[in-house]
Image (tube, rainbow, N blue to C red):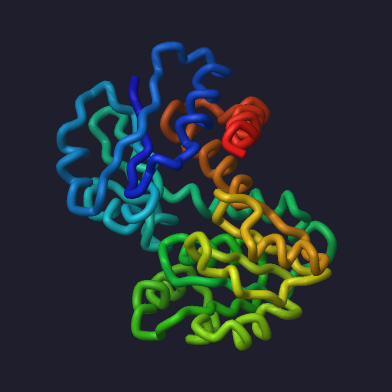
Amino acid sequence: MRAAVLGSPVAHSLSPVLHTAAYAALGLDDWHYELHECDEAGLEGFVAGLDGEWAGLSLTMPLKRVALEVAGEVSPLASATGAANTLVLREGRRFADNTDVAGLVAALRGAGVGEVGPARRAVVLGAGGTAQAALAALRELGIPEVDVLVRSLERTGELRAAAERIGVSPAISATLADPALTSAAITGADVVISTLPAGAADNLAGAGAGTVLLDVVYAPWPTVFAATAAAAGAHVVSGLEMLLHQAVAQVELMTGHPGPVDQMRAALDAAVAVRT
């Protein structure tokens, strides 16, 4: 059986490390995981050319929204968030799902969110597919107040639609272009999730003691944003934690076996150590 991660750019992806480690731990010696560069225009053709050996695809940017268009079936969660990072291809199916939500929830719970007193307010930076998954994760964690900071309100249509489907009502403001206003909004938040690309949050501050900050960027690590927050006393969570747990869920969807978390984490840690 074959599986792969698709995206553009995708050469940096650590998904092959995670899935290959899972196959080894599960004894799936005839399973192979690949990496393919693919943009939005090329996804339909790529999927159409796959044969019965293919079990599934992991989809990273910019494919998370267009994945819904090439799927024959869409999970309620992927439909609600308006984005999918997984396409299961077993037995002729094209089933789209979103394991980013599970990855975010597990990463935040691992940092103690919801474990020691209720978190009241969260701030999400960005308006893309991962931000939409963050809204679903925060709803699952029971955080009632959510602020979403974006650069332009004109580009939040899909985010607003996803929020309505998920059943949340975040306060959305176009303050992201102003570092001072953004940092002020972050101050005092229980949880901050940055879904911004590498470097985009370098000039932001505001997260300190009492804040759990998850930066989805994991290379290079720590990001400037994460390092600034850690120095101020925040509990910082690497995007690697989200990456690990969303991959664990993908392995189960594609293989039918529970993802071996410990072996996948060990392989991920080893790969990161080599890269740094």
Residue 98 in the image, given as x and y percentages of width and height: 44, 50
Can residue 103 be seen? no
Q: How many marks?
A: 0
Image quadrant in which you'd find residue 128: bottom left
In this rendering, is residue 52 above or below 74?
A: above
Residue 240 in the image, given as x and y percentages of width and height: 60, 46
Q: Quadrant of the C terminus?
A: top right
Report the residue at 47% width, 68% height from top. Answer: 166
Report the residue at 41% width, 73% height from top. Answer: 159
Image quadrant in which you'd find residue 232: bottom right
In this rendering, is residue 175 above or below 159?
A: below
Does 230 sit left or right of 87 as displayed?
A: right
Image quadrant in which you'd find residue 211: bottom right
Can residue 19 be seen? yes
Residue 263 in the image, given as x and y percentages of width and height: 64, 25
In this rendering, is residue 268 above or below 192?
A: above
**Residue closer to the observer: 15 or 271:** 271
Does 271 sit left or right of 73 as displayed?
A: right
Does 238 sit left or right of 21 as displayed?
A: right
Report the residue at 63% width, 46% height from top. Answer: 241
Q: Quadrant of the N terminus?
A: top left
Residue 162 in the image, given as x and y percentages of width and height: 41, 70
In this rendering, is residue 93 above or below 1?
A: below
